[in-house]
Amino acid sequence: MFDYLIVGAGFAGSVLAERLASESGKRVLIVDKRNHIGGNAFDHYDDQGILVHKYGPHIFHTNSADVFDYLSRFTAWRNYQHRVLGSVDGQLFPIPINLTTINLMYGLNLNSTEAEQFFLSKAEEVKDVRTSEDVVVSKIGRELYEKFFRGYTKKQWDMDPSELNASVAARVPVRTNKDDRYFTDTYQAMPLHGYTRMFEKMLNHPNIKIMLNTDYHEIVNDISFRQMIFTGPVDEYFDYRYGKLPYRSIEFKFETYDQEKFQETGTINYPNDYAFTRITEFKYLTGQRNAKTSVVYEFPKAQGDPYYPIPKPDNMELYRKYQLLAEQTADVWFAGRLGTYKYYNMDQVVAQALSLFKKISAPAPHRGTYADPIIS
Ligand SMILES: Cc1cc2nc3c(=O)[nH]c(=O)nc-3n(C[C@H](O)[C@H](O)[C@H](O)COP(=O)(O)OP(=O)(O)OC[C@H]3O[C@@H](n4cnc5c(N)ncnc54)[C@H](O)[C@@H]3O)c2cc1C
């Protein structure tokens, strides 16, 4: 008899398995339908011996000391500040848009104060900021919006920014200084030996049994357990009773080139050209040395593995119906990006799992429910 059946061996499932086993002495069975642990953060060495991320580039960043300290039990880190350039009109510009971007683009030599004035002069007045277009246009104006945001967003979501919630663009800051780091979080680092190694350490506990290549439907009636933690898609759990929650998927195309370096920085975005959104060169992220180099091209797709919950009001409404069902389901806890239909980064999923663990371990009885992450 297991205390917990955990569905999904990504960050949500693995953190909860580790906590329940090491801290509460619970017996845990963790199942994943894929042939590996780590969920979407899984990495592996390709045929050329280069460490690549199977489900697209994963860069760790957080402002939470709790999350960083917790993960540091399972990995050493390599300091890494991610940098992104955008290919616009045949030239490369820093992204997020910063002082260098506008000086380069308009042949100017502004300082930070002048840049603020520049953005103000370009910004359009939007009375009620509701969509992603509203957010960007009201910050930097229509021209920069068209050059850097509109095409990328259309490719990424197959929707015009005017159809998307403001929250999508709220993640894209604009700077008036020369800071060209993609993230500004306190902790920015990559697991020194990769994510998969970190997950192996996390799950290496005598109370944790791992079953791969197994959809939980195949075993759920044959195994006895007290409670379930479900980190797969919440609509799948309820047999799509109210219909499918929409997701955006991505096709990843990996290439290895017979040259040491392929591009100028870790990621180059292509907002307006080609069908792919961006190219990432893994050696920048991992610091690995090799005479060859591997990159990944990302092609957003409607069909495929569920990656990005689509943040539209209708979908949030639909999710709320599933959320209600989930809250009424005894002895099942829902967690993670798919289990709570939220666009979470890795650190937010870890924070959510840590806080769900506290809730589960609290003495008072609870029904299946969620825990909000402690950071945003
Ligand atoms: C392209 C891309 C790039 C990203 N880049 C970053 C980044 O740079 N930085 C960052 O912080 N975050 C990034 N993320 C987000 C990050 O991947 C997630 O926050 C994190 O992996 C979510 O962990 P999870 O455990 O919730 O879900 P997942 O990692 O998706 O794990 C869920 C697991 O459940 C399994 N499962 C589902 N259904 C079943 C079933 N029926 N039976 C058995 N198993 C099942 C799945 O196989 C999967 O392994 C990125 C995401 C994507 C898609």
Image: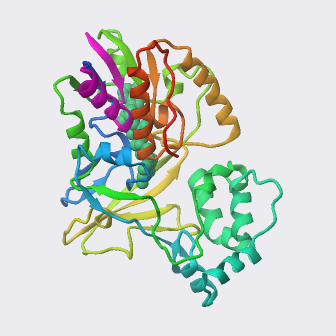
Q: Residue at x 49, y 18 (%)?
A: 368
Q: Is residue 89 visible?
A: no
> Looking at the image, which is closer to me, 57 or 343?
343
Residue 248, x across and y down, in percent: 54, 44
Q: Write down the quadrant of residue 302 in the picture.
A: top right
- The stretch of residues the image draws in magenta is 1-25
Residue 163, x across and y down, in percent: 72, 50
Q: Write down the quadrant of residue 259 in the picture.
A: bottom left
Q: Is residue 23 magenta?
A: yes
Residue 141, x across and y down, in percent: 73, 70
**Left or right: 55 in relation to 199:** right
Q: Is residue 254 visible?
A: yes
The quarter of the image that holds ligand 1 is top left
**Left or right: 241 in relation to 232:** right
**Left or right: 353 in relation to 139:** left
Q: Is residue 126 above or below residue 95?
A: above
Residue 233, x across and y down, in percent: 48, 30
> Looking at the image, which is closer to me, 137 or 72?
72
Q: How many marks?
A: 0
Q: Write down the quadrant of residue 150 in the picture.
A: bottom right
